[in-house]
Amino acid sequence: MADGQQTSFSHDPVMRDEIVDVFAEVPPGTILDATLGGGGHSEALLEARDDVDVIGLDRDPEALHAATQRLGHFGRRFRTTMRRFDDIDEGLAEHGVEALSGAIFDLGVSSHQLDEGSRGFSYRNDGPLDMRMGPDANWTADDVVNGYDVRHLADIIRRYGEERFASRIANAIVAARPIETTNQLAEVVVAAIPAPARRTGGHPAKRTFQAIRIEVNGELEALPTAIDKAIDRVVPGGRVAVLSYHSGEDRIVKQRMMAAANQCECPPELPCVCGAVQTVRIVRKVAKKPSAAEMERNRRSTSARMRVAERIVEDS
Ligand SMILES: C[S@@+](CC[C@H](N)C(=O)[O-])C[C@H]1O[C@@H](n2cnc3c(N)ncnc32)[C@H](O)[C@@H]1O
């Protein structure tokens, strides 16, 4: 992991204007940016609302360093915490904050993480097989690529990468061990995919790299708890917005928001006797996508889906 001293950090915040709109009318107070990255969304919110402050959370020290430099001029209105986003409670306690006006999650990796070869996420820029978002991750891409058995490897490539050639790729990886760099891994993956299929759907190694990254960082495991905790912390009228980038993430987001919107567990044909209270309303039934212009300008935004829930009642 680099020492966090670099200052250039490029990441174009996805659906920036839409995020500003989502939080335009939440009550004054604190908004948690649970995936601070380069601080693009935090900056937009701090500029748009002078009656809110932001706590920026990230597990990546490089992101925290870059965002602190960028947003330092907001003074006490911008504070940070370095941890995983399912540790929201500890992050808020660090700053003596209990209730939130809102929370935003912009899932996955930043362009900086993806492009910086030394982080090991890139199938274009060579680097070590690392892929850890932060020092808290328990293992690296090397452990997955060179250590998992072929069935386990195929399973994560299929599930987290939605890759139809997962078995072929997993077999090719195992046959090529030891694999030491991201370029070597990318070459093995590309060679395992039939030539006609390599020509469609972006870089042929993209889905496999995404799958390994999700596995290394336990990305899907942390998400349900994090969303539930954020919903619990938000005041009436406050909102939780989540930008996800693949169907596995979006399914979890939708499920957690729907659970909070209708927590009654009674059979639907009978009147409610369980006393469940609906805590949020879903702001849009269908996830919102970036505009055509944004997708054209920023290719990395194309898979984004935004879901928003608004808190409607106070806990008794
Ligand atoms: C897509 S980037 C966010 C970009 C940011 N919205 C901006 O405008 O610059 C996602 C960030 O979330 C962080 N991240 C992802 N999963 C995390 C988790 N479970 N806990 C803490 N941070 C996480 C990553 O390290 C990365 O910096």
Image: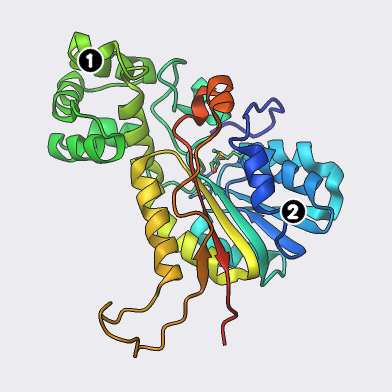
* Quarter of the figure that contains the C terminus: bottom right
61 sits to left or right of 177: right
Label 2: element kind:
strand
Q: Amino acid at mark 2?
A: Arg
Q: Nearer the viewer, residue 184 or 220?
A: 220
Badge nearest the viewer, 1 or 2: 1
Q: Return the residue at label 2.
A: 79
List x then y, in percent, for residue 276: 41, 83
Q: Return the residue at label 1.
A: 197
Quadrant of ligand 1 in image: top right
| Mark 2: few/some/many CA within 10 Å (<14, 14-19, 20+) | some
Label 1: element kind:
helix
Q: Amino acid at mark 1?
A: Ala
Mark 1 CB within 8 Å of ligand 1: no
> Would you place residue 124 above or below residue 111 in this image?
above
14 sits to left or right of 136: right
